[in-house]
Image (cartoon, rainbow, N blue to C red):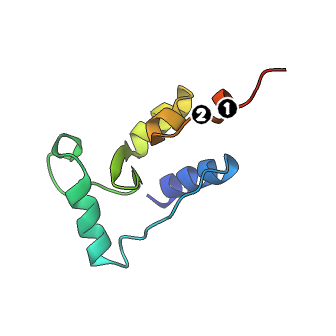
Amino acid sequence: IKKKQQDVVRFLEANKIEFEEVDITMSEEQRQWMYKNIPPEKKPAQGNPLPPQIFNGDRYCGDYDSFFESKESNTVYSFLGLKSRLASKTES
């Protein structure tokens, strides 16, 4: 879990994407919020969803596997619900 969390954090930092890391082991309130805000179809059949779970504000983006797939297909900005930085740069 820690390696996956670090992978997400490193990517966000490298791309200068602002984020807030929430440690659900330190806050029962945050843990309950996360569980409540993951869509039912995204929850595992048994047990609780494991971190990292990625949100943009209250909008659920996905889990690590979804993040990794979006990274591999170069669609992370879309996955996160952000506008691509590439689209905002003017062509020379």
Look at the picture and state if 61 lies above or below 4: above
Question: Can residue 48 be seen from the camera position used here?
Answer: no
Separation of marks 1 and 2 at Cα, in angstroms: 7 Å
Q: Which residue is mark 1?
A: 88
Q: Are marks 1 and 2 in contact (CB under 8 Å)?
A: yes
Q: Kindly identify which numbered label has been placed on residue 51.
A: none
Q: Residue at x 49, y 65 (%)?
A: 21
Q: Is residue 84 above or below residue 38?
A: above
Determine whether 1 is above or below 64 in the image.
Answer: below
* Front in this rendered view, residue 55 or 9: 55
Q: Is residue 64 visible?
A: yes
- Amino acid on which the number 1 mark rests in the picture: Ser
Q: Position of residue 60 (x, y in %)?
A: 33, 47
Write the residue at 37% across / 79% down: 26
User: Which quadrant does the C terminus fall into?
Assistant: top right
The answer to which quarter of the image holds residue 31 is bottom left
Asked whether 9 or 81 is in front, the reply is: 81
Q: Nearer the viewer, mark 1 or mark 2?
A: 1
In percent of width and height, residue 39 lies at 21, 46
Q: Which image quarter: residue 37?
A: bottom left
Q: Counting other residues with Cα less than 10 Å from the Cα at mark 1, is it few (<14), some (14-19), or many (20 or more)? A: few
Q: Is residue 44 left or right of residue 81?
A: left
Give the residue at mark 2.
84
Which residue does the image show at 37% across and 46% down from the upper left?
63
Q: Residues within 10 Å of mark 2 (few under 14, many from 20)?
A: few
Residue 19 x, y percent position in the rendering:
54, 58
Q: Residue at x 14, y 45 (%)?
A: 45
Q: Secondary structure at mark 2?
A: loop
Q: Identity of the amino acid at label 2?
A: Ser
Position of 74 with respect to 49 (left or right) is right
In the rendered picture of this protein, how many numbered marks are placed on residues? 2
- Using the image as rendered, state which of residue 17 and residue 51 is in the foreground: 17
